[in-house]
Image (cartoon, helix red, strand yellow):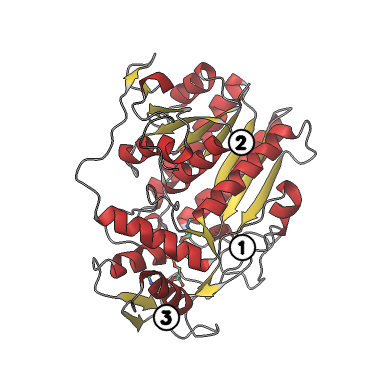
Amino acid sequence: MKKRILTTGGAGYIGSHTTVELLKAGYSVVILDNFENSDRDRVARLPLIAGTADVRLVEGDVRDAQLVADVLKHHKIDAVMHFAGKKAVSESVADPLLYYHDNITGAVSVLSAMRDIGCNKLIFSSSATVYGNTNHLPTPETVPPSVSNPYGRTKLIIEEIIDDTAASLSNFQALSLRYFNPVGAHSSGFIGECPRGVPNNLFPYIAQAAAGIRDYVQIHGGDYETSDGTGSRDYIHVVDLARGHVAAVEHLLSASTNPTPHRKVNLGTGQGHTVLQVLQAFSKACGFQIPYRIGPRRAGDVAASLADPSLGLALFHWKPMLGLEQMCQDHWHFQKRERNKPGSGVRMPLCAHETASNHLVSNETHPLTAGSRDVPN
Ligand code: WQD
């Protein structure tokens, strides 16, 4: 019997790539998403990429605990991957209460529903932002958190809520995955990162500069103590990150009992790259030099962040395989497709679900089944 995974925020950047890898690994997937920061067209592409349509969509809000409980019960969910939440550091500084309300309410809602229904396996989308400006590089999970912004603080608070929840329930098991810098896109070019408005993050900004949407890349700071003065980060291909989630949930589902009911695990490569090195790699991927200017540092930035990825390897035998060149090639391929995308996307038909405000899409009604001519090889 196939194990079924609920991905909250499963239509988002990380969630959609993880849904594809779950489907390819033989899982059935239910996506719960309110499309606040994602689009329906992306969901319709997932069966095309994965070659299987065993994915269902429930359109709704993760902060509605009753809805989450309904979905857990109706679909007999074996494990939950909780991606849904706001993730922009600068926005969290401008409006902290929005982040505390949305991110923490969403997590408490998911945990309450899991407790009530008896679903006891959780993967939480955490972030390396919890380490703040640490000098302990590469950074293992044992480094004490030191958050410096409301977004990072919501991630840390949710990890602590999961600690307490796991301690209060007899067989609850969780992994909080601390992402370093996810970048890139699926090699098909069907899904990738498409931020709304001006991108905050480096990769989408570079991609848009390469596409002529931005005039040049403004490099935030050229006087850091790094090899070339620009900030250094641990970039990880989003497909490697997604495969890390599959390895993590397999670990959770196979472990009968776990002495440590909640563990935090880094998802990074252990290799750092500076902004100038990324620009050079991206220029090589697109075949021309991307224009840039070096300006003042950005408030809140750290000079360098770098993962110690050894626990993920030890716990669930996961090792990132895709390098910076592939990250740039795949991101650029996606950006070019996005620029040329026709106005209308593929839409997934929706059918009624028990609760009036939500919808389910069963395999039978999906127009793009695994056997259709459109499924990529
Ligand atoms: C990377 C480097 C910038 C943009 C963010 C989130 C963090 C996490 C990962 C979710 C830095 C430089 C950037 C630009 C630049 N997300 N830069 N020009 O800040 O490391 O982390 O993404 O968990 O929460 O904060 O990523 O891509 O913004 O910056 O020079 O236009 O690129 O200074 O050195 P960051 P980033």
Q: Residues within 10 Å of mark 3 (few under 14, many from 20)?
A: some
Counting from the top left corner in percent of width and height, residue 23 is at 53, 35
Instruction: Return the residue at label 2.
Output: 122
Q: Nearer the viewer, residue 13 or 365?
A: 365
Label 3 lies in ligand 1 vicinity (Cβ under 8 Å):
yes
Helix, strand or loop status at disc 2: strand
Distance Cα–Cα, label 1 vs label 3 = 24 Å
Q: Is residue 249 above or below residue 357?
A: below
Distance Cα–Cα, label 2 vs label 1 = 23 Å
Helix, strand or loop status at disc 1: loop
Quarter of the image with the N terminus is top right
The amino acid beneath tag 1 is: Thr
Instruction: Return the residue at label 1.
Output: 269
Helix, strand or loop status at disc 3: loop
**Front position among marks 2 and 1:** 1
The answer to which quarter of the image holds residue 142 is bottom right
Res. 201 visible in picture:
no
Upstream in the sequence, badge 3 or badge 2? Answer: 2
Quarter of the image with the C terminus is top left
Q: Is residue 86 above or below residue 307?
A: above
Counting from the top left corner in percent of width and height, residue 301 is at 47, 71
As drawn, the label of residue 221 is 3
Q: Residues within 10 Å of mark 1 (few under 14, many from 20)?
A: many
**Front position among marks 1 and 3:** 1
Q: Ligand 1: which quarter?
A: bottom left
Q: Residue at x 64, y 32 (%)?
A: 121
**Extreme residue toward the left, this view:** 343
Res. 311 visible in picture:
yes
Distance Cα–Cα, label 3 vs label 2 = 39 Å
Find out whether the residues at labels 3 and 2 contact each other: C-beta distance under 8 Å. Answer: no
Q: Nearer the viewer, residue 80 or 262?
A: 80
Label 2 lies in ligand 1 vicinity (Cβ under 8 Å):
no
